[in-house]
Image: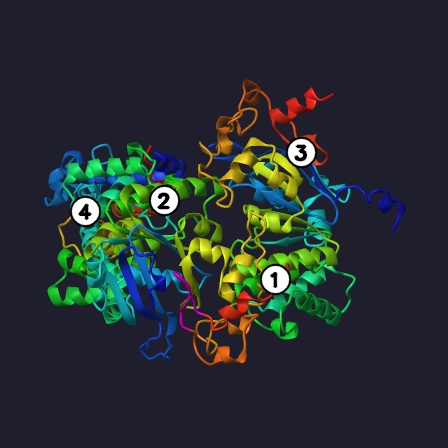
Amino acid sequence: MSEVQKANADEPLLEVRNLRLSVRTDEGKAQILDHVALTLPRGRILGVVGESGCGKSTLARAILGIVPKAATVESGEIRLEGRNLLALSDRTMTREIRGRRIGFIPQDPYLALNPVFKIGAQLLPLLTWHAPELKTAADRRARLTNLLRRVQIPEPEAVLERYPHQFSGGQRQRLMIAAALAANPSLVIADEPTTALDVTTQKQILGLLKELTVEFNLSMLFVTHDFGVVAELCDEITVMYAGQTVEAGQTAKVLTAPQHPYTTALLACHPDRSDALTGIPGLVPSPLQAPPGCRFAPRCGAVADVCSRRSPKLVGIAGDHFVSCRLADETRSATP
Amino acid sequence: MLVLKKFAKDKPAVLGAFIVLIVVVVAIFAPLLAPYPGDAAASHLLLRLKPPSAAHPFGTDNLGRDILSRVILGSRGALAIALLVVGTAMLIGVPLGLIAGYSRGWLSETNMRITDVFLAVPQLILALAIAQLMGPSLQSAMLALTLTYWPFFTRIVYAEARRLSASLFIDALQCIGAGTTRILFLHVLPNCISPVIVRATIGMGFTILVAAVLGFLGMGATPPDPDWGLAISESRQYLPEAWWFSTFPGLAIFLTVLGFNLLGDGLRDIVDPRLRRSR
Amino acid sequence: MTTGARAGGTASILEARDLEVLLGGRQRFLGTAVPPVRAVAGVSLTLAAGETLGLVGESGCGKTTLGRVLLGIQRESAGEVLLDGRIVSGMDRADARKSRNAIQYVHQDAGAALDPWWSIGGILDEGLRVHGLGDAVARHERIDRMLGAVGLDASFRLRYVHELSGGQLRRVALARILLLEPRIVILDEPTSGLDLSVQATVLRLIQDLKARLGLTYLLISHDLSVVQRICDRVAIMYLGRIVEIGPAAQVFAAPRHPYTRTLLAAAPRLVPGHEMPGANLIIGDPPSARHLPPGCAFHPRCAFGESKCTEAVPRLEAAGAVHEVACRRWRAIDVVPVSI
């Protein structure tokens, strides 16, 4: 290990700071991400949780550098292993980062594989592009079959000659996991990878992902809407609302003692938790007309005048638990 | 209205709509707009083959009739053929397509095989055959065009109805006990009418063109009708000296067909039901 | 059948006896014969007036098919359906559906189940007109009242399907069905695809409407948190058969069937302590309904399976007063030492 790397060993693998992203639409500018912050320490699994439209998938795509054409990153940085990804060219992102340093597991394994090509024909080229250290086709084949065996796909040699439709949803997701790991990445981003699966299959996939992070020395960014899955899989959690980060911290802490009113309200909606099944009054604001200041203010039970005047900062309370709310601001300034 | 806003952005479509609108207005008020409405039938041999002038802006033809008046009067025939042919073809083709698309088994299969047979018959050949049988006239041309055009509507509606019959909202209607006729005409039909409208619009232009071809071949309109195709046919022997004789009826055909085609292409983009808005 | 599947003493309004459904399997013109798939195999259950019965299972287990057969939109291959004690099965689709007007079905994907061409008011009116209920004025009033009852207002009458959010669409779908004054409502995955905060309000509405209108629910779902939350009884299905049925509290607290235990252990839950004693993590996918293993369909994946499990399909047997289980080894499982 070189000196430089040693110095960075304590540094988080992935750090997103102050990320703002907007999309031009026919009806005006939509602020999809607004001051998003996120920290993923090495070797950990971070769950990014939020309801639909909160920007969690856009965030995952921004890290991969595959935002839509109409989108503009207005400010912020995305640092992976010390490099600011936003400063890299498209060419560098394609050649050195995406697929090589960052693996991606999509939501829908049915759409992610081309139905007319064999599995081998689709997965082996990944190794040609991203694992140049493997010189011969036989080496690449060996690496791939080992990976397939590791993700518990029976008869990996034969699998390379099969077509995607011959696999069940769970098996296809295993194929996608193998594809994501093909180039030995340091970060894996998974976008709702178990949403389309049955619970018993989901359980198997979650177990597999957990083992693989340890075995391959990975860090994982796991995008989901399901608190149950986060509770089961993730070490850390970042909660998003309407394009803003509202709370971040260790999963156990955030789920048992949420500090942001939104996290509290959302957890109270879960059928396992809720006493009255009240829901949250009001609607998620449109990104075209985001309210000024804290975006949750119009629906918040603890709203004050200051909330609509300025955006709260993500501040640390009690160690590595971060909250973006005036309440946290006040608590902190009250304690000397 | 979102639909109009979107349509207004589509320049070629607006141009097409403008042309079609002008043709329709001209056709409706043809006798009032034509400087010499009597020239539909009358002839003035002393004035034959005069080049364009102030009195006759498009010149005169071989019988001394004002070409501007005949082009204006001819728009009525062209539009009437288009409307009648496309309308009748829709009346035959759309219900057949609905039934074939919604039903399964022999009814659907028989229906579509018959449609395919008609689709295979070349339009002009059938028109020539019918003209032989019934004598060349506008009626036989229209009959031939209708007989060869309805299968297009059946095909379109069949594909749409097949897709819709598998959709969840049709299933939901069956679940609440709605009858087949009701589902077909109140729910399947409105949802597959958009591509039909597009096809019909383009079909109007197409029909005008083919009708002109039939007129040119002497299998459609008969003299002294102010038919555009017929006019071009009559003008052939006076080319190239009397260039105006064939040019202006030709331009009329060209512009009308272009208008319908541009409009049809534009409609294709905006007939998405998702553009319906309550406010 | 035993009395165990009946909910304690209340009158049953809907009953299914040995229902079988064969799907597909037809000789196509000039094509090869496709063997049918047994989507539902010998299912018997009763629905007591005023209860909510949850029908739980993974995709392809036949729960939606069973719901559609009970509704009458899908024909049964064998067995009977009784509504208020009258046999309403064995007729063709249209008659079966007509005789079961008291049962209505709410689709899983509310947005796709509403006609995109019609306004919401038109969609709601259409249901009433199909059933010939009331004149134009009366229908108008009823629609306004029902929109209010599902938490929307009369202004929604003019809106279109694509202008509504997921939660609003569920409300419209519920309103359309409830306008037809059913007594039994089959809810197919009523909250799938909804956000947590919206899901909570929709579940609340479903519970409120049941109490207000005196409804009976058959709730089809794969979401165990939701089922546990709002169902009185729950039936677990695996590959076309009910493997366990009983009061929700009992099934969730002390599941008897190995598959139920596996399912409960696999579901990600927010409340701790859901580790299921004796449940194994099953590997692989469920077998295809086309090639069912002999005997108990679960035995190849079962931790408690023995050679006798392959011999005969286990019947539901009483495992408590109102709790039935279809496993020949359930007594043995109960005493398996627990290790967490």
Q: Are marks 2 and 1 in contact (CB under 8 Å)?
A: no
Q: Earlier in the sequence, mark 4 or mark 1?
A: 4
Please give left or right for residue C36 compared with residue A289 in the image: left
Same chain check for tags 1 and 3? no
Give the alpha-carbon distance from disc 4 to disc 3, as whole Å. 56 Å
Q: Is residue B252 visible?
A: no
Work out whether residue A23 or residue C275 is closer to the camera in this orientation and state it: C275
Marker disc for residue C206 = 2
Give the alpha-carbon distance from disc 4 to disc 1, as whole Å. 59 Å
Name the secondary structure under disc 2. Answer: helix
Name the secondary structure under disc 3. Answer: strand
Residue at the spot of label 3: A322
- Residue C95 rendering spot, x and y as whole percentages: 19, 62
Residue at the spot of label 1: C338
Q: Residues within 10 Å of mark 2 (few under 14, many from 20)?
A: many
Name the secondary structure under disc 1. Answer: loop
Residue at the spot of label 4: C129
Q: Residues within 10 Å of mark 4 (few under 14, many from 20)?
A: some
Amino acid type of the residue that numbered disc 1 sits on in the rendered structure: Val
Residue extending farthest to the top is A305
Using the rendered view, name the quadrant where residue A304 is placed: top right
Residue B141 vertical position relative to residue A34 in the rendered view, above or below:
below
Amino acid type of the residue that numbered disc 2 sits on in the rendered structure: Ile
Nearer the observer, disc 1 or disc 3? 1
Give the alpha-carbon distance from disc 2 to disc 1, as whole Å. 38 Å
Residue A93 vertical position relative to residue B149 in the rendered view, above or below:
above
Please give left or right for residue C63 compared with residue B30 in the image: right
